[in-house]
């Protein structure tokens, strides 16, 4: 797994380097009446990529937290159900079950 991560990191680094070298032209971004200073295009691309990554990570973390809470709730329900069923041998699949 470490080799795979190293290869992926090198590929991403190479892609970023390629992006920086091919998009070095200075640009100015205007939005909502605000104008940025003139910076190389790859700076804006990297900033927006990073913002997208952070937004996706935040959404994923919220979803993961919700799923963990749901798992904890279901495990509590399962434990309560197992506690009730252990008092009754028939419900637990004891010898009283005839087919």
Image (cartoon, rainbow, N blue to C red):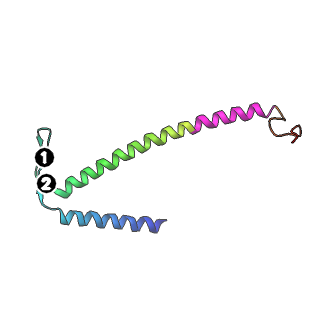
Q: In this view, does 44 lie above or below 79?
A: below
Residue to which mark 1 is pinned: 36
**Would residue 72 be found to the left or right of residue 43 on screen?**
right
Residue 38 image offset from top left, x and y in percent: 10, 52
Residue at point 64% right, 34% down?
76
Residue 77 image offset from top left, x and y in percent: 65, 33
For the residue labelled by badge 1, is the local secondary structure a helix, a strand or a loop? loop
Mark 2 near mark 1, Cβ–Cβ under 8 Å?
yes
Residue at point 28% right, 52% down?
49
Query: Residue reaching furthest front?
Result: 99
Q: Distance between the residues labelled 2 and 1?
A: 8 Å
Residue to which mark 2 is pinned: 39
Q: How crowded is mark 2: few (under 14 residues within 10 Å), some or many (20 or more)?
A: some
For the residue labelled by badge 2, is the local secondary structure a helix, a strand or a loop? strand
Residue 21 image offset from top left, x and y in percent: 19, 66
Q: Residue 5 carries which label?
A: none
Residue at point 25% right, 50% down?
48
Instruction: Please state the extent of the stretch shown in magenta in the rendering.
Output: 71-87
Q: Quadrant of the C terminus?
A: top right
Quarter of the image where one finds residue 12: bottom left
């Amino acid at each position: 797994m470490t080799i795979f991560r190293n290869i992926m990191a090198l590929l991403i680094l190479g892609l970023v380097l390629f992006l920086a070298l091919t998009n070095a032209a200075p640009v100015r971004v205007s939005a909502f009446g605000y104008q940025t200073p003139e910076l190389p295009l790859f700076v804006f691309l990297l900033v927006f990529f990073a913002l997208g990554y952070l937004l996706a990570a935040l959404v994923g973390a919220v979803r993961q937290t919700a799923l963990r809470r749901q798992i904890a709730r279901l495990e509590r329900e399962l434990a309560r159900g197992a506690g009730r069923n252990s008092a009754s041998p028939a419900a637990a699949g004891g010898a009283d079950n005839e087919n």
